[in-house]
Amino acid sequence: MNAPHEPVTRPASASAMARRLVATVIVSGLIFLLLWFMALSVLTSLLIAAGFGIVVVAASAASDLVEMVLDAIAAVVFGVLGAIAAFFAAIFSLFGS
């Protein structure tokens, strides 16, 4: 008897989807701030950033390529945030006991 075959691709876990959503929210927030500071009004910047976020999330659900790119962006965003947190933790540990 042959053993049952597992599917080649496993479904994405909930934590991976949460990471992609949080990274999309962070990037959308950065786009909002950039547009608002550069030239546009608050409402226009908010509409453009929200549209960007919706398009990216919808595209990542439909396309594996966009999902892969969004995973890479999430890794970079959280890597930078982790490095900043480690920097401040090192500084505060110098002043600790």
Image (cartoon, grey):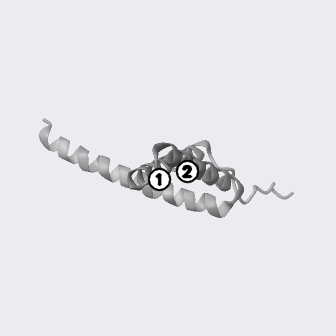
CA distance separating discs 1 and 2: 8 Å
Q: Residue at x 37, y 55 (%)?
A: 80
Q: Secondary structure at mark 1?
A: helix
- Left or right: residue 68 versus residue 28 is right
- Left or right for 10, reference 34: right
Left/right placement of residue 7 relative to residue 96 reads right
Which x, y percent locates residue 5? 79, 57
Disc tally is 2
Residues under numbered marks 1 and 2 in contact, where contact means CB atoms less than 8 Å apart: yes
Left or right: 78 in relation to 70: left
Question: Is disc 1 surrounded by few (<14), some (14 to 19) or many (20+) residues within 10 Å?
Answer: some
From what the image shows, is residue 96 above or below residue 65? above
Per the image, label 2 sits on a secondary structure element best described as helix
| Dot 1 amino acid type | Ile
Q: Quadrant of the N terminus?
A: bottom right
- Percent from the top left, x then y, of residue 10? 69, 53
Kind of residue at disc 2: Ile
Looking at the picture, how far across and down is residue 35, in whole percent?
45, 53
- The image shows residue 52, relative to residue 96, as above or below, that is below
Q: Quadrant of the C terminus?
A: top left
Q: Nearer the viewer, mark 1 or mark 2?
A: 2
Residue ID at (61%, 54%): 56
> Which residue lies under the disc numbered 2?
48
Label 1: which residue?
Answer: 31
Question: Which of the two residues, 83 or 70, is positioned nearer the viewer here?
Answer: 70
Q: Is residue 5 visible?
A: yes
Which residue is at 75% across, 56% downward?
A: 7
Estimate the x, y position of residue 60 in percent, counting from the top left: 65, 55
Circle 2 residues within 10 Å: few <14, some 14–19, many ≥20: some
Question: Which label number is shown at residue 86?
Answer: none
